[in-house]
Image (cartoon, helix red, strand yellow):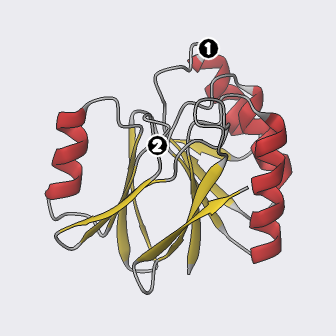
Amino acid sequence: MLVVAISDTHDNVAAIRRVGEEVRRRGIRLVLHAGDWVSPFAARFLREAVGEGVRIVGVWGNNEGERPYFVETARKYGVEIAGEAAELEVGGKKIAVYHGTSPVLLRALAESGLYDVVVYGHTHQASLERRGKTLVVNPGELCGCLTGRSSYALIDLEKLETDLVLL
């Protein structure tokens, strides 16, 4: 099963639409968002971009200021907001999603041995590494505002491999 991981969309609607095209083209059924959506309409645009039938699970970043309205909007469009962190099991693999604002908490998730995959963001720098049996993935920034590179990660849960994809 292939999963798309994104982070730091920062309201870049054009980038959200481009990743949505990729999700549709590849037939992806799960999108993980590691935070810094920013405004509530980002959830709506992501849903519209990926279409119905795609599960979207996201967490808060450090830039979502309108959280109560965001939750309301996300619910309306079938986007799951797990709070500060998410834990889910998909295809027999345990996945944690966290924005990454605390290096201590991020390290604990990555090195705990509890997860097959840990997805995080915050730094705007793409990073793909292994810590023991855990695949640790920062998809970089979808918005492209700091690095000039709009990217996402494509995770193969069966092989526990990932590729960084530039848009």
Label 2 crowd (10 A; few <14 / some 14-19 / many >=20): some
Which image quarter: residue 147? top right
What residue do we see at 16% from left, 65% from top?
Answer: 113
- Dot 2: element: loop
Residue 61 pos. (x, y %)? 48, 29
Residue indicated by mark 1:
66
What residue do we see at 14% from left, 57% from top?
Answer: 112
Q: Is residue 55 above or below residue 48?
A: below
The disc, 2 or 1, on the residue closer to the chain's N-terminal end is 1
What residue do we see at 39% from left, 33% from top?
Answer: 84
Of the numbered discs in the image, which one, if any, rests on residue 121?
A: none
Cβ atoms under marks 2 and 1 closer than 8 Å: no
Relative horizontal placement of residue 164, taking residue 132 as reference (left or right):
right
Image quarter hosting the C terminus: bottom right
Amino acid type of the residue that numbered disc 1 sits on in the rendered structure:
Glu
Which image quarter: residue 42? top right
Looking at this view, name the residue that lies furthest to the bottom.
159
In this view, the mark in front (2 or 1): 2
Query: In front: 109, or 66?
Result: 109
Residue 101 pos. (x, y %)? 34, 29
| Disc 2/disc 1 C-alpha distance (Å) | 25 Å
Look at the image and tell me whether residue 93 can be seen.
Answer: yes
Residue indicated by mark 2:
125
Query: In front: 71, or 65?
Result: 65
